[in-house]
């Protein structure tokens, strides 16, 4: 690891961390807090995906819908209006909206083939955004003078890596330049995440094989055909399975490539010093 002892971490003039966990366990909250402390560059993987790698997809999709309205079509064709994505660290909705949910188009769903195509686009984008981390560490120091760096990953980072492979390209690249920190939730956190998701289901990215199993399993269990699936019902049904699927992957990533901190402890972070202490406590 980049910092193999608590002493090395505390003494480091440049602290660099990669936070990973399920969405909702505090990655972005802590990243924002560190950024506001003044010495930390906050690199948001989801923001990078939406601005650098999927920006055109998102905007073109919005234009495609607008072109179906004659009034808007005329304005677009004459360059009289502009459609853009108002993406920010605090508003990543354009990315999740583009990803969408599979199922009945009348209920806002996407045909499964189109859904898989967008999933593949997101996978390529997230892989590349993760591999851009080293570039942004250098950029943050050379261009802006930030001594410290926090990479705020998306919950789906574990879908594209193999923690058991010592040569995994993404984990190798990340661990060479930063300390991998897993924010581990408890059973109570998991139950709360499921309740929260049930109230407001949001699009997610999945491993292709996992998605295929869940899609076929849902069709078999409900007796529905692909065109009549309620999109929200499907992703609600899939969410708990996704949590169970990701948990051992996160754990293996932390065991072999980094450290583990508890979500309950991370929730108590109020200052940069609090964060330094929590990470130090997880190191030998």
Image: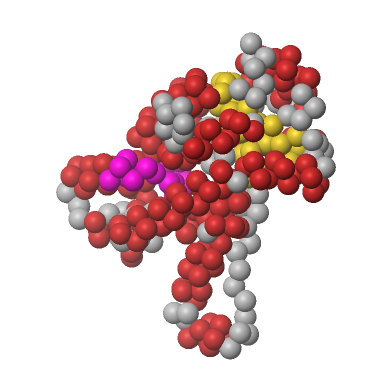
Queried whether the magenta region covers residue 210, the answer comes back as yes
**Where the N terminus falls, by quadrant?**
top right
Relative to 79, does residue 174 appear above or below in the rendering?
A: above
Residue depicted at x 54% and y 86% = 77
Asked which quadrant contains residue 142, the reply is top right
Pick the front one: 201 or 52: 52
Residue depicted at x 22% and y 46% = 216
Magenta-drawn segment: 196-212
Pick the front one: 28 or 134: 134
Residue depicted at x 31% and y 54% = 230
Q: Is residue 209 left or right of residue 75?
A: left
Task: From the top left corner, tell me how far across and down residue 89 is, in percent.
Answer: 65, 49
Colour style of the rendered protein structure: secondary structure
Q: Single out the residue that lies furthest toward the top.
A: 284
- Specify whether residue 266 is in view: no
Task: From the top left corner, tell me how far across and down residue 48 is, in percent.
Answer: 60, 51
Task: From the top left corner, tell me how far across and down residue 245 is, in percent.
Answer: 37, 32
**Where the C terminus falls, by quadrant?**
top right
Q: How many marks?
A: 0
- Specify whether residue 83 is in view: yes
Q: Is residue 250 left or right of residue 31?
A: left
Relative to 73, does residue 56 appear above or below in the rendering?
A: above
Queried whether the magenta region covers residue 85, the answer comes back as no
Task: From the top left corner, tell me how far across and down residue 165 is, in percent.
Answer: 42, 29
Q: Is residue 182 left or right of residue 217?
A: right
């Amino acid at each position: 690891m980049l910092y193999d002892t608590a002493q090395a971490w505390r003494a480091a003039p440049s602290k660099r961390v990669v936070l990973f966990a399920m969405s909702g366990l505090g990655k972005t909250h802590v990243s924002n807090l560190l950024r506001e402390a003044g010495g930390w560059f906050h690199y948001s993987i989801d923001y990078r995906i939406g601005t650098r790698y999927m920006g055109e997809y998102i905007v073109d999709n919005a234009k495609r819908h607008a072109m179906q309205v004659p009034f808007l079509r005329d304005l677009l064709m004459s360059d009289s209006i502009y459609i853009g994505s108002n993406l920010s660290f605090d508003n990543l909705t354009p990315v999740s909206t583009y990803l969408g949910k599979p199922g009945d188009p009348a209920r806002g769903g996407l045909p499964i083939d189109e859904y898989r195509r967008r999933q593949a686009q997101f996978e390529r984008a997230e892989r590349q955004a993760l591999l851009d981390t080293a570039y942004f560490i250098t950029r943050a120091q050379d261009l802006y003078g930030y001594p410290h760096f926090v990479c705020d990953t998306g919950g789906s980072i574990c879908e594209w890596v193999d923690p058991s492979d010592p040569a995994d390209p993404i984990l190798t690249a990340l661990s060479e330049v930063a300390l991998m920190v897993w924010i581990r939730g408890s059973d109570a956190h998991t139950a709360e995440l499921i309740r929260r998701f049930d109230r407001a289901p949001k699009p997610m990215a999945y491993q292709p094989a996992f998605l295929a199993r869940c899609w076929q399993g849902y069709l078999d269990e409900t007796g529905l055909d692909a065109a009549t699936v309620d999109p929200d019902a499907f992703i609600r049904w899939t969410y708990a399975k996704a949590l169970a699927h990701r948990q051992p992957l996160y754990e293996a990533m932390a065991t072999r490539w980094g450290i583990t901190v508890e979500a309950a402890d991370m929730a108590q972070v109020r200052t940069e010093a609090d964060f330094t202490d929590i990470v130090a406590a997880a190191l030998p």
